[in-house]
Amino acid sequence: MIASDIVDHMADMSLNGANTVVEPFGLKMRIAGLNFYYGRSRALHNIDLGVRANHITALIGPSGCGKSTFIRTLNRMYELVRHTRVEGEVTLDETSIFAMDVSDLRQRVGMVFQKTNPFPKSIFENVAYGLRVKGHRKKSVLADAVEHSLKRASLWEEVEDKLHESALSLSGGQQQRLCIARALAVNPEVLLLDEPCSALDPISTAKIEALLVELKQSCTIVIVTHNMQQASRVSDYTGYFLLGELLEFDRTPTIFQNPSRKETEDYITGRFG
Amino acid sequence: MFGLTGFCAFMSVGILFFILGYLFWQGSTSLNWAFFTELPAPVGELGGGMANAIVGSGKLLLLATLFGVPAGFLAGVYLAEFGGTIFPIVVRYTTDLLNGVPSIVMGIFAYALVVQPTHHFSAFAGGLALGIMMIPISLRSTEEFLRAVPHNLREGAVALGASKSRTIFTVVVPAAMKGIVTGTMLDLARVAGETAPLLFTSFSNRFWSPGWNHPMASLPVMIFTYAIAPYPDWHRQAWAAGFVLVAAVLVVNTISRLILSRSGYLER
């Protein structure tokens, strides 16, 4: 299947239910004809992709293939970098993200980064940050939301006694779950994760993977990962990026067991990358 | 060559400890309780103290901080967070030049700006002279410490929908606060001993200053006045004043670092 057909194909699936599995959810985000430029050099070539609601979409590919650049267009984080330009269309619930207020967009489409980045504040203030941005002031509202978010990120039991201690006192794995809790506090509809486990040990990684599978009940997840086992374990759909192109996109079992492109197979079987 | 370079290195350290040691020896023996509590004695009488100069120095430094630090801090934020390409280079080069301007010239500037139009010396003029001297270091240290804040902290805040200014003032500046405050303390310590710009701005006063708009005593000017006076008792008081000034600078520096290191908001 070539990449440009995928959006149509997935739209068909959701409309007709013609596929083998009945999909109750439509597309949360659609990306069509997306090109991305750093100055004059083109980093993404004509990406077409549909992100299915309440599913986990994994993006894999070798370093420098554009998967991180791609995920950063979905919440317009690329705008922090000078001399970048986007062509094409990205929609969230059928509304162009480029027409939205950027602050609203980023509250609806949350992001967790590769390197853990808790603010040098207390655990409580870290989680409450996005709510304060939204304008919430009331202590009771903040406290409830902080507790709820920490529970969703399965961190509550570990930190409930030290909410007002510095977030930097937590371990690496706890810090990453704190960053997830921080992103969840504003109830995002989509959660983007840019290699969230690459700096974590296997136990912390397992915790975060279990968490993601649980979270897809309530939000749509896009995860960039270097770890192919991780993609195959947690995701429902997988896209393979190479040199700024989305070479293949399909259901995860198909990508891992029966890829249609030779390049994908080479990458997955470890002959390349 | 080893011997010569080593000797010079030893000398550089030795001179500092010689000065500190001599100051401690002369100063501490001349120091008594009256120095902190009494006004200067009239000429010809023994004893007295410099209570007014100690308070005056504190007030002048407060004024200097109010004048210099907000300007230097905000300009530093501008350079680190908003600067374009050419203007920041101009600003940096200019502030480096400003930093190199002899302190007496700063005094003349404040004299022309405040003392001449108002026709009298004032604490306000002295504070302004010291405040301008504080701007370059405040600016550069703010800029450096803000730049040292990891980029991914900014990304974390922006990804939660925070605007650029909200990100700067709720995440980046707090993360750099330890460095910025330490930089300000060092800056204060540097101008605390400045004498030349105060000689013809805040001037001096042998009594309690009636207000910010009047001449005000300060330790450095008192040291100058007392050290060149022909009375041995005044010389002893000058030593005591020098000792108190150096000790105050050291104590302020140490305390501010201690408080910050225990605040829990460690730099990353």
Image (spheres, coloured by chain):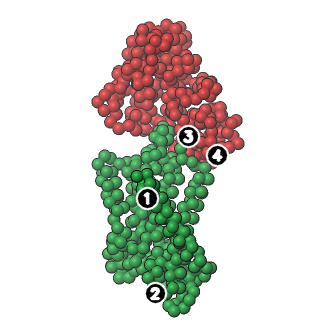
Chain colours: A red, B green
Q: Earlier in the sequence, mark 1 or mark 2?
A: 1
| In the displayed structure image, the side of residue A77 where residue A139 appears, left or right | right
Element on which disc 3 rests: loop
Vertical order, A232 against A118 (above or below):
above
**Which is nearer the eye, A264 or B183?**
B183
Residues at marks 1 and 2, common chain? yes
Q: Which residue is mark 2?
A: B230
- The residue depicted at 44 percent of the width and 54 percent of the height is B3
Q: Earlier in the sequence, mark 4 or mark 3?
A: 3
| Amino acid type, callout 4 | Glu
Nearer to us: label 1 or label 2: 1
Element on which disc 4 rests: loop
- The residue depicted at 37 percent of the width and 48 percent of the height is B82
Q: Which residue is mark 4?
A: A165
- Which dot marks residue A118? 3
- The Cα–Cα distance between marks 1 and 4, rounded to whole angstroms, is 49 Å
Where's residue B263, x and y in %?
60, 53
Q: Chain of mark 1?
A: B
